[in-house]
Image (spheres, rainbow, N blue to C red):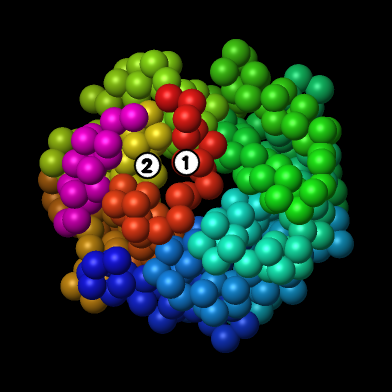
Amino acid sequence: MTPLLVQTVDSIAAVQQRDGMIPWFAGGHADPWNHVEAAMALDAGGRRAEAEAAYHWLVATQRPDGAWHQYYRAGEVEETTLDANVTAYVATGVWHHFLATRDTGFLQSMWPVVEAAVGFVLDLQTPRGEVIWARHADGTPWSFALLTASCSTFASLHSALAIGGHLGHDRPGWEAAVDRLGRVIVEEPGAFLPKARWSMDWYYPVLSGVVTGDAARARLAAGYTRFVMDGLGVRCVADKDWITAAETAECAMAYLAAGEPGTAHRLLEWAGHLRHQDGSWFTGMVHPQRHHFPPAERSTYSAAAVTLATTALTGAGPLVPLLSVTVGRR
């Protein structure tokens, strides 16, 4: 790992709280999805103790139903929504930690956590296959599914199956659920709330391994001019010239998954204007004004996404589980 990337990983560790929680920035809130993303970046940077502290925080805060709340701040629940995708992502992080450490004991200790999380998620899967986005705190489900969230859940369920397979726990019901989810993502776009202006809905079907091969390359090509600003990076939304570090890094990983490493490298290089000299990363920048937005915000999840994309592109760390779904299926 290069000194510059070590500095970026260090910037994440510097924000981690004593209880293991990794907020978006010092004094900010945390959501479990981006918390896991940051934990994976810590592992990629060799900070095993800090990564394990992050997973211990998840163990301590998991609800009896297997879920986590949407936001936490200073040891308290800030937003009570129970997001299925956020909950599923623990499996991605746990599998990534195993790939980084080969610690089967850790995997065994986290299996009940992963199993409970998957149970919560699959209770929100419809007979058609999509996963409803969330439940209210009282248990009432929301009325819609989201494409990006369902794609991420697809990959997380693959990680959960990999964990179970390594530990000797067959879960044919999970396999069937993944198949139904993948089918509805590919064949029934009307199953999801329309959010086509968001770049994540463009590249996440590729990043998550739902869409592969020629279809993946065609999907990325179709959205390139709408979402990419040449020389700068990836827009968060199509109708705003707002480049974000996390979306650019994730999109780079999607291009890598699709077998286009050249474009992946270019995107990540273009994002360099969002790096702060201390190694942290600005969340985004509005062009042509070159104003950081949110103003002055440097987020751990942005630094984490860049770290994971860089290690995936260079082969310097364990393969990100989102990408491992697509290996060999190009």
Q: CA distance from mark 1 to mark 2?
A: 7 Å
Q: Residue at x 72, y 35 (%)?
A: 132
Chain part drawn in magenta: 259-273
The percent coordinates of residue 1 (x first, y second) are 29, 66
The percent coordinates of residue 158 (x first, y second) are 64, 40
**Tag 2: residue type?**
Met
- Label 2, on which residue? 253
Which structural element holds mark 2?
Answer: helix
Q: In the picture shown, does residue 320 fall above or below 257? A: below
Q: Main secondary structure of the magenta part?
A: helix
Which dot, 1 or 2, sits closer to the camera?
A: 1
Q: Around disc 2, counting alpha carbons within 10 Å, would you say few (fewer than 14), some (14 to 19), or many (20 or more)? A: many
- Label 1, on which residue? 323
Q: In the picture shown, does residue 164 fall above or below 79? A: above
Q: In the picture shown, does residue 152 fall above or below 67? A: above
The percent coordinates of residue 92 (x first, y second) are 60, 51
Q: Which mark is residue 117?
A: none
| Number of marks in picture | 2
Are the residues tagged 1 and 2 within 8 Å (C-beta)? yes
Residue nearest the observer in this picture, 172 or 254 = 172
First in residue order: circle 1 vs circle 2: 2
Q: Residue at x 40, y 69 (%)?
A: 45
**Tag 1: residue type?**
Leu
Quadrant hosting residue 218: top left
Magenta span has 296?
Answer: no
